[in-house]
Image (spheres, rainbow, N blue to C red):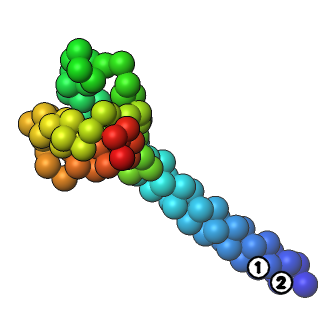
Amino acid sequence: MRTSILAIWLFAVIVLCSILGSVCFVLGGVVAEQQCYQQYFSEREQGVLGVIRQEQWSKSIQIGRDSKGRVVLLGSVDSKTLQENLAIELMTVIGKRDAYHAVVSLEVKGE
């Protein structure tokens, strides 16, 4: 009788440790991924800020980030041409794919 109680307790402890270990492993992965996204954003933020602080952009555009750490620009530009010019300027700082992703959320006032 005493051995069966001990075996049950041992089994319960092993199951509980396995479950908690798995949960902690998954949570650790999620936290690490978020830290990678934040670092990705931080690396690009200063360069993008340098571009949008220029006189023609500074009044109407703010910087943000999406859930994957990519730069997203918020605000508006006067024309589609200005939006494209901004994307071209950003390409040298953050690359082509990220530059177009950043400007796609900008509102174009002329449209």
Kind of residue indicated by mark 1: Ala
Q: CA distance from mark 1 to mark 2?
A: 5 Å
**Which residue is at the far front?**
110
Q: Secondary structure at mark 2?
A: helix
Along the line of sight, the residue nearer the viewer: 98 or 52: 52
Left or right: residue 70 versus residue 92 is: right
Q: Position of residue 4 (x, y in %)?
A: 83, 83
For residue 65, which quarter of the picture?
top left
Kind of residue indicated by mark 2: Ser
| Residue 101 visible at all | yes
Q: Position of residue 73 (x, y in %)?
A: 35, 37
Above/below status of 53 relative to 81: above
Identify the residue under disc 1: 7
Along the line of sight, the residue nearer the viewer: 108 or 10: 108
Residue at the (45%, 56%) spot, across then down: 29
Identify the residue under disc 2: 4
Q: Are marks 1 and 2 in contact (CB under 8 Å)?
A: yes
